Amino acid sequence: MRTCFYFFIISFCFISLNTLHAQTTHSFTEGLVVGPCHQYGREAIYTDQLTYQLIQKTFVKPIEGAVLLTNEKGQELKWQKITADTAKRFRHAALSNGYVYLTYQSPKETVALLNVAGHAGLYFNGIPRGGDANRYEYMYSPVKIKKGLNELIVRVGMGGRFQGISARLVFPEKPISLSLPDITLPHVVLGENSEPIWGGIVLFNATEKPLTGLKIRSLVQGKEIITDLPTITSLNSRKVGFKIDASAVTQRGDLTCEVSVLQNGKVVDTKTLTLQAVNNKEHYSQTFVSGIDGSVQYYGVAPQKGEKTDSSALFLSVHGAGVEAIGQARAYKPKDWGTLVAPTNRRPRGFNWEDWGRLDALEVLAIAEKKFQPHPQKIYLTGHSMGGHGTWYLGATFPGKWAGIAPCAGYPTLMGYGSADGKIPENSTNPVEQLLLRASNPSNVMALAQNYKASGVYILHGDADRTVSVEYARTMRNTLGAFHNDFSYYEYPNGSHWYGDHSVDWAPLFDYFKWHRSKKAEDADVLDFTTANPAISSHYHWIGVEQQIRPLQYSRIQAKRMPNEKTLAITTDNVQTLTVHPSAFLANQSFKLKIDNQEITGTFQLNNQPLYFAKKDKWEATEKPSIQQKGAHRNGTFKTAFNHRMVFVYGTTGTKEENEWAYNKARYDAETWYYRGNGAVDVISDKEFSLAAYADRGVVVFGNATTNSAWNLVLGQCPIQVQKGSMKVGNETLSGDDLGGYFIYPRPDSPLASVAAVTGTGLAGMMATESNQYFTGGSGFPDYFIFSAAMLKEGTKGVKMAGFFDNQWKFSPADVVKVP
């Protein structure tokens, strides 16, 4: 698997160099560095002293020896000279949580592609642009070069001192161009290529106007197909999907695909790609259009050896950090009793299998179940390293879905083990941080551990693993040992983190799977289910949590079915509304119900629809809650609005500076989403938005009721209202121009989609929202988070308010923390 990943990197670098060889470049080799002066992680709270100075307009152009600030220890942080090495990479101890200042003197006004590698984010002439924290090296941002001085302020993360950064400007030959380094392509699977397949390619708009009406034409062995493209906004890039007609391909091997961009019927750029045709018994990649954002994603397949049968299994294997899905699939020899499928997590690092990584895994699982039609009781989950965490996480989150799970070299939680984005803090005595950590509760598999009783568990770990210590496996062995009666544990002698393909393709592990089938709902008389968010995980077989009393606190249901007495006995914790699903009893069979030792009046029958019971003064039968309330369909938190093919809507009704901020921030989030999640998103103005044109799609509004005309359409009834100079939260009004916030609210005309606001009361508050961590896997954001720009300097002292709405999406005094 390592070999596959390294081959991908080498191939990428070769394509990248050849693609850009003919274009003029300027590499930055000298600059200034200062640090540490910021702290980001898997939290909504962050501090950044330099950005704070930019917001307050106190930032002074750096010179060598000048003091940026005096830290809390009384030490002066001074700008120091930094020079790139022979590889044109900057390295310096101050890069760790520091900044690099670079300049470019231009003889004229022009447009370039800015390529910085190894950074967490940057400002180019004061405008935020996306980062490259994982050093993929294919983040190119079209930027306007001013005549004269151009300033680049680059934020570098904790590991910057070791990895270093590089920066350059590439002056493109064409204003509209395709880019090959970050391409997404499937294999052409012989015998399965009668329908068009999808590819994804980056398109640059190096002009100051939006590009509309573009098309992509692909040509393979005489077969042409044209795909309409979405609008590409000014000085922006987007990874666009395009169709490929490979129906004429009949032989295994490499083949060329010519891809051309058409503007008004004229070709403006052409690239030649290489596709690979394979037979359906070889490992292969397959693409699909994601329901999350409409982008093209892929998964890897290790097909079943021999013919599929009605008892064939499906193995979902989730990869480790930096590993491509096809590399994960190729680590497994084909099995004669099932197919293995490897989703991508949206990127080789992606979201740690949380948040949108979780959704990607579920999307691929649903596609694989439809395509390969496995036996419903023979679906298994496994993964390595970060994928070992993904196995622990997905296994605990979705009990009843897996016949067996097998984490290999995995860590259980992001609280105990971090990556480039750091760890989720384990605890805090600060009320604000406690509430934010509550928003991260779905990540804590230790609190969900009882859910592992739903399936067999096989733990595999090398006893000499220096990357993910074997102590994590031993901790989980001890945890399971307290209650689980069906798990197996093996430490591979002298095994490092990766000791060959048998680090995952381990025969005893698959033998263990073969011995296991998941229970049918009708055969499970005792159930124990815990969830932190019903919109993520709401039920286990025939019981479910529809609504919580305290949002994002853990909810637990323990249920016992007594078939002879035709009775259900249920105990609950933090459950407002519970569901009993049809598989609890046969249709039309009457049964009695006891909840928390209370006999529920009457007898009940199940007829293909769940029954609902609500806790008021006492438990009683009720109707299904309105879709306008919180529930399993839609429950918060802020990050969940970035789904359902979301659209970013920037405001145009404010001042010139506010309007520029809104577009720049929307573009920055689109770039970050592309980078983190291999994603694509429509970026439109408020004037272009209408409910009908973007029906049932998530909406992210940039601005406030004064500066964004779409606000009242989607947020007019929200308990939080923001306008220029003030913010009203419930009955409380906060004043000032430096307040920023993030919050979610259900889209009023949709049963599923939500609206997110990235907002501020003035330019200072808006700028305070620019650097965020909501695309970081596992980071906790509640339903709303309100702060002043002072948070960037003072941390939690600058937070004003954070909390969760109640089940009616109203302000709840019981679930809010305020800072005086």
Image (cartoon, grey):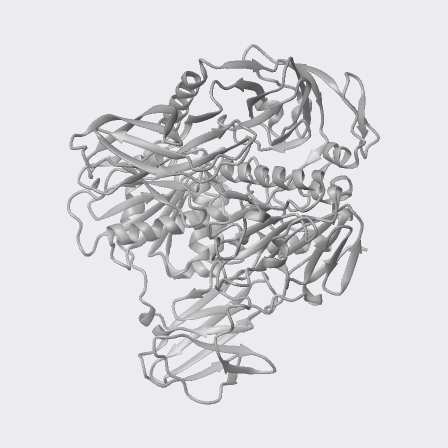
Residue 392: x %, y % from top left: 45, 50
* Vertical relation: 540 (above or below) 381: below
Q: Identify the image quadrant of residue 607.
A: bottom left
Instruction: Give the residue at x 52% y 63%.
Output: 749
- The C terminus - image quarter: bottom right
Residue 612 appears in view: yes
* Vertical relation: 526 (above or below) 400: below
Say which of 152 and 72 sits in front: 152
Using residue 486 as the reference point, say whether residue 735 is left or right of it. right
Most distant residue in the right direction: 74
Residue 494 appears in view: no
Residue 69: x %, y % from top left: 80, 29
Say which of 463 and 310 sits in front: 310
Q: Identify the image quadrant of residue 105.
A: top right
Residue 470: x %, y % from top left: 47, 40
* Vertical relation: 759 (above or below) 134: below
Residue 315: x %, y % from top left: 31, 48
* Vertical relation: 764 (above or below) 4: below
Using residue 289 as the reference point, say whether residue 679 is left or right of it. right
Most distant residue in the bottom direction: 602
Instruction: Give the residue at x 57% y 14%.
Output: 26
